Image: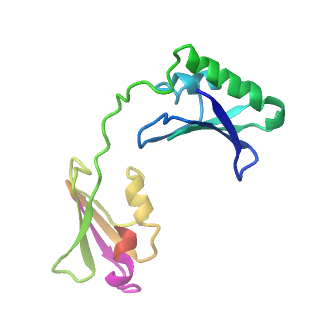
Amino acid sequence: MKITIKETQNPTILKFEFSDFLTRGKNYEFKNIDEAQNSPLAQKLFYLPFVKTVYISGNFVAIERFSIVEWADVQEEVAEQIENFLAQGGKVLLEDTAPKKIPISVYGETTPNPATLKFVVNRKITPQAVEFKNIDATKVSPLAQALFQFPFVKELFFDENYISITKYDIASWDEVTLELR
Protein backbone atom coordinates (compact mmCIF):
# COMPACT_ATOMS: atom_id res chain seq x y z
CA MET A 1 0.00 0.00 0.00
CA LYS A 2 1.32 3.41 -0.96
CA ILE A 3 1.06 6.14 1.66
CA THR A 4 0.28 9.81 1.08
CA ILE A 5 1.54 12.18 3.77
CA LYS A 6 -0.84 15.01 4.69
CA GLU A 7 -0.47 17.84 7.17
CA THR A 8 -3.27 18.65 9.59
CA GLN A 9 -4.34 21.88 11.29
CA ASN A 10 -2.30 20.79 14.30
CA PRO A 11 1.42 21.04 13.40
CA THR A 12 2.29 18.19 15.80
CA ILE A 13 -0.07 15.74 14.03
CA LEU A 14 0.63 14.25 10.62
CA LYS A 15 -1.69 11.97 8.62
CA PHE A 16 -0.47 8.97 6.67
CA GLU A 17 -3.26 8.21 4.18
CA PHE A 18 -3.84 4.91 2.36
CA SER A 19 -5.78 4.15 -0.81
CA ASP A 20 -7.64 1.35 1.03
CA PHE A 21 -9.59 1.39 4.27
CA LEU A 22 -7.80 0.25 7.42
CA THR A 23 -10.88 0.13 9.65
CA ARG A 24 -14.57 -0.34 9.04
CA GLY A 25 -16.51 2.39 10.79
CA LYS A 26 -14.36 2.49 13.92
CA ASN A 27 -11.84 5.00 15.17
CA TYR A 28 -8.99 4.21 17.51
CA GLU A 29 -6.79 6.41 19.67
CA PHE A 30 -3.76 5.04 21.49
CA LYS A 31 -1.83 7.17 23.98
CA ASN A 32 0.84 4.57 24.80
CA ILE A 33 2.07 1.10 23.88
CA ASP A 34 -0.06 -0.56 26.58
CA GLU A 35 -3.28 0.91 25.15
CA ALA A 36 -2.23 -0.35 21.70
CA GLN A 37 -2.48 -4.05 22.56
CA ASN A 38 -4.93 -4.72 19.73
CA SER A 39 -2.87 -2.79 17.15
CA PRO A 40 0.51 -4.24 16.15
CA LEU A 41 1.08 -1.21 13.90
CA ALA A 42 0.50 1.28 16.72
CA GLN A 43 2.74 -0.76 19.01
CA LYS A 44 5.53 -0.59 16.42
CA LEU A 45 5.08 3.16 16.06
CA PHE A 46 5.40 3.69 19.82
CA TYR A 47 8.98 2.38 19.60
CA LEU A 48 9.80 5.66 17.86
CA PRO A 49 10.83 8.00 20.71
CA PHE A 50 8.89 11.00 19.40
CA VAL A 51 5.46 9.33 19.06
CA LYS A 52 2.96 10.75 21.56
CA THR A 53 -0.39 9.46 20.22
CA VAL A 54 -1.48 7.19 17.36
CA TYR A 55 -4.90 7.59 15.73
CA ILE A 56 -6.26 4.97 13.32
CA SER A 57 -9.43 5.75 11.40
CA GLY A 58 -10.90 4.88 8.03
CA ASN A 59 -8.08 5.14 5.51
CA PHE A 60 -5.40 6.84 7.59
CA VAL A 61 -3.03 6.63 10.52
CA ALA A 62 -2.37 9.96 12.24
CA ILE A 63 0.54 10.40 14.58
CA GLU A 64 0.98 13.13 17.15
CA ARG A 65 4.62 13.80 17.95
CA PHE A 66 6.48 15.13 20.94
CA SER A 67 8.44 18.30 20.18
CA ILE A 68 11.84 16.57 20.18
CA VAL A 69 11.74 16.34 16.35
CA GLU A 70 10.13 18.14 13.43
CA TRP A 71 7.94 16.20 10.99
CA ALA A 72 10.02 17.43 8.04
CA ASP A 73 13.00 15.53 9.46
CA VAL A 74 11.28 12.15 9.97
CA GLN A 75 8.03 11.90 7.99
CA GLU A 76 9.46 10.02 5.00
CA GLU A 77 11.14 7.43 7.24
CA VAL A 78 7.93 6.94 9.23
CA ALA A 79 5.92 6.45 6.03
CA GLU A 80 8.51 3.93 4.81
CA GLN A 81 8.40 2.03 8.12
CA ILE A 82 4.59 1.82 7.95
CA GLU A 83 4.69 0.64 4.31
CA ASN A 84 7.36 -2.00 5.08
CA PHE A 85 5.50 -3.23 8.16
CA LEU A 86 2.31 -3.75 6.15
CA ALA A 87 4.15 -5.23 3.15
CA GLN A 88 5.68 -7.86 5.45
CA GLY A 89 2.21 -8.93 6.59
CA GLY A 90 1.99 -6.77 9.71
CA LYS A 91 -1.54 -6.12 10.96
CA VAL A 92 -3.02 -2.69 11.57
CA LEU A 93 -5.54 -4.09 14.07
CA LEU A 94 -6.22 -7.48 15.61
CA GLU A 95 -9.77 -8.76 15.75
CA ASP A 96 -11.65 -6.68 18.25
CA THR A 97 -12.28 -8.89 21.25
CA ALA A 98 -13.72 -6.12 23.37
CA PRO A 99 -17.37 -6.51 24.28
CA LYS A 100 -19.69 -4.66 21.98
CA LYS A 101 -20.89 -1.35 23.31
CA ILE A 102 -24.59 -1.20 24.02
CA PRO A 103 -26.24 2.17 23.48
CA ILE A 104 -27.64 3.69 26.63
CA SER A 105 -31.07 5.26 26.54
CA VAL A 106 -32.33 7.57 29.24
CA TYR A 107 -35.80 9.05 29.51
CA GLY A 108 -37.49 11.18 32.13
CA GLU A 109 -40.67 10.30 34.01
CA THR A 110 -42.70 12.55 36.25
CA THR A 111 -43.29 11.64 39.88
CA PRO A 112 -46.00 12.70 42.35
CA ASN A 113 -43.51 15.23 43.72
CA PRO A 114 -43.21 18.11 41.19
CA ALA A 115 -39.66 18.87 42.41
CA THR A 116 -38.51 15.32 41.55
CA LEU A 117 -38.01 13.75 38.14
CA LYS A 118 -37.12 10.11 37.57
CA PHE A 119 -34.55 9.29 34.85
CA VAL A 120 -34.92 5.68 33.70
CA VAL A 121 -31.94 3.92 32.09
CA ASN A 122 -31.98 0.79 29.90
CA ARG A 123 -29.28 -0.92 31.99
CA LYS A 124 -28.47 -1.65 35.59
CA ILE A 125 -26.69 1.30 37.19
CA THR A 126 -26.39 0.14 40.80
CA PRO A 127 -26.80 -3.18 42.62
CA GLN A 128 -28.59 -1.55 45.54
CA ALA A 129 -30.57 1.60 46.20
CA VAL A 130 -28.57 4.54 47.50
CA GLU A 131 -29.55 8.08 48.45
CA PHE A 132 -27.39 11.20 48.34
CA LYS A 133 -28.65 14.14 50.39
CA ASN A 134 -25.67 16.38 49.45
CA ILE A 135 -22.37 16.36 47.58
CA ASP A 136 -20.41 15.37 50.71
CA ALA A 137 -22.01 11.91 50.59
CA THR A 138 -20.99 11.21 46.96
CA LYS A 139 -17.41 10.00 47.41
CA VAL A 140 -18.41 6.50 46.22
CA SER A 141 -20.17 7.73 43.07
CA PRO A 142 -18.53 9.84 40.35
CA LEU A 143 -21.93 10.10 38.64
CA ALA A 144 -23.54 11.53 41.77
CA GLN A 145 -20.62 13.94 42.14
CA ALA A 146 -21.11 15.10 38.55
CA LEU A 147 -24.86 15.57 39.02
CA PHE A 148 -24.34 17.68 42.15
CA GLN A 149 -22.25 20.06 40.02
CA PHE A 150 -25.54 21.39 38.67
CA PRO A 151 -26.56 24.22 41.04
CA PHE A 152 -30.23 23.22 40.98
CA VAL A 153 -29.70 19.59 42.15
CA LYS A 154 -30.86 19.17 45.75
CA GLU A 155 -30.94 15.36 46.30
CA LEU A 156 -30.36 12.14 44.37
CA PHE A 157 -31.74 8.65 44.69
CA PHE A 158 -30.22 5.80 42.66
CA ASP A 159 -32.00 2.49 42.22
CA GLU A 160 -31.34 -0.47 39.97
CA ASN A 161 -32.21 1.22 36.65
CA TYR A 162 -33.16 4.79 37.47
CA ILE A 163 -32.04 7.98 39.16
CA SER A 164 -34.50 10.30 40.86
CA ILE A 165 -33.34 13.89 41.00
CA THR A 166 -34.90 16.41 43.32
CA LYS A 167 -34.18 20.00 42.38
CA TYR A 168 -34.34 23.41 43.96
CA ASP A 169 -36.94 25.82 42.56
CA ILE A 170 -34.30 27.97 40.81
CA ALA A 171 -34.86 26.10 37.53
CA SER A 172 -37.82 24.47 35.82
CA TRP A 173 -37.69 20.90 34.52
CA ASP A 174 -38.27 22.19 30.98
CA GLU A 175 -35.01 24.12 31.18
CA VAL A 176 -32.78 21.37 32.63
CA THR A 177 -34.13 17.94 31.69
CA LEU A 178 -32.22 17.58 28.45
CA GLU A 179 -28.94 18.66 30.03
CA LEU A 180 -29.39 16.25 32.95
CA ARG A 181 -30.31 13.39 30.66
Q: Is residue 111 rendered to the left or right of residue 52?
A: left
Point out the residue furthest to the left here.
112
Q: Estimate the x, y position of residue 176 in percent, counting from the top left.
A: 38, 78
Q: Estimate the x, y position of residue 128 in percent, counting from the top left.
A: 21, 50
Q: How many marks?
A: 0
Look at the image and say whether residue 166 sits in the magenta stretch. yes
Point out the residue furthest to the top here.
88
Q: Is residue 26 rendered to the left or right of residue 61?
A: left
Q: Is residue 46 visible?
A: no
Q: Is residue 53 above or below residue 1?
A: below
Residue name at image x 59 percent, y 36 percent: 31
Residue name at image x 38 percent, y 49 percent: 140
Q: Nearer the viewer, residue 181 or 127?
A: 181
Q: Estimate the x, y position of residue 106 in percent, counting from the top left.
A: 27, 63
Q: Nearer the viewer, residue 118 or 95?
A: 95
Q: Is residue 60 above or below residue 139?
A: above
Q: Which quarter of the image is occupied by the C terminus? A: bottom left
Q: Which residues are magenta?
A: 162-176
Q: Nearer the viewer, residue 42 or 159?
A: 42
Look at the image and say whether residue 29 sits in the magenta stretch. no
Q: Is residue 21 above or below residue 83?
A: below
Looking at the rendering, which quadrant does residue 1 occupy? top right
